[in-house]
Image (cartoon, grey):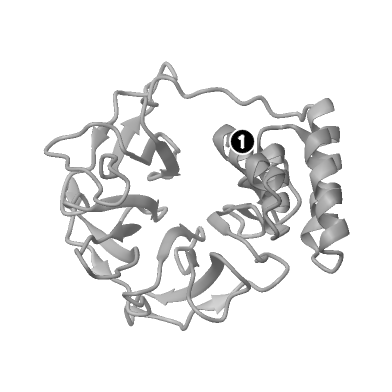
Amino acid sequence: MKSAETYYQKAIAAKYPDPEAIVRLADVLKSQGKYPEAITEYQNFKKLAPSDPRGDKGVKSSELAQQWKDSPGRYKIENMALINSKESDFSPTYSDKKYNTLVFTSTREGVNQKQDITTGQNHSKMYETKLDKNGKWSTPVILAGAVSSAFNDGAAAVSKKGDFMLMTRCPEIKSQKSGCQLYMAKKQGSGWAEPVKLPFNIDSVQFGHPALSADGKTVYFVSRMKGGFGGADIWKTVYDAKGNSWSLPINLGPQINGSNDEMYPYVSDDSKTLYFSSNSHPGMGGLDIFKS
């Protein structure tokens, strides 16, 4: 973000004609917590593009962010140092009813792990850690079975019974556009059976980040398929376990989905609250957590 700030400033100083440079400078300033400077740039953008809603939205969100920063919330955030690594660790999901087993995704160094041809980072894999009687998490181990492939695997959701998992897998095919896809894997002994791709996936479109309702019937997920409101949207589908079938995906609509990205949904056990990440709604900068 710091480098982006420098180069947007250089572009503007060099009289770059498109006001897009100004709003992007404002965005990276906000993402760094530089709210007064961000407000100035959003106001500059408004003068050049008065009909673009990003100017007003940016000013409002920066003012709100400053208020939130000055008034800390009631939740204390702590680093899960025992299970985190120097690489990316994300998308945690409980895999048992007692909340004693956690499955998460990581790009840490693993067994026979190759690098992503796009990012140069390690491929992501799913790991499992268990909570002991003293409240300490065990050293994470890679998930056994066919859910670990030569590609990026992760961002999963495990059913309450622990009998099946929904996961994201991102195939890599040279000289061919192929998006991440949603798969289902069923429990097989102490491991997992070969994942099966869900039928509504489209190979050239990105799908991922599944979340399960407590009864295992409604699946919320993220996709960039047509019919959305811009960027990545959150959709839902209903699973019929008896018929092993899926309903056609339904977009959650403009109340949830905005012009940018909505990602990483999670639904509460009573199915009454949806949590998700977004950079469309007014926030503090970048992807923030929202609930509906």
Above-or-below relation of 282 to 235: above
| The quadrant where residue 103 appears | top left
Q: Residue furthest top?
A: 134
Q: How dense is the environment of label 1, judged by Cα within 10 Å: few (below 14), some, or many (20 and up)? A: few
Identified by mark 1, the residue type is Thr
Viewer-proximal residue among 7 and 244: 7
Is residue 91 found left or right of 106 in the rendered image? right
Q: What percent of the width, then of the height, locates residue 164?
A: 31, 59
Above-or-below relation of 139 to 38: above
Viewer-proximal residue among 79 and 11: 11
Mark 1 lies on residue? 6
Residue 139 visible to the viewer:
yes
Q: What percent of the width, then of the height, locates residue 230?
A: 60, 70
Q: Which residue shows up at 61% across the image and 60% down it? A: 271
Q: Residue furthest front?
A: 14
Q: What percent of the width, then of the height, locates residue 55?
A: 81, 56
Is residue 283 found left or right of 64 in the rendered image? left
Position of the C terminus by quadrant: bottom right
Q: Which residue shows up at 30% across the image and 70% down it? A: 177
Is residue 225 found left or right of 26 in the rendered image? left
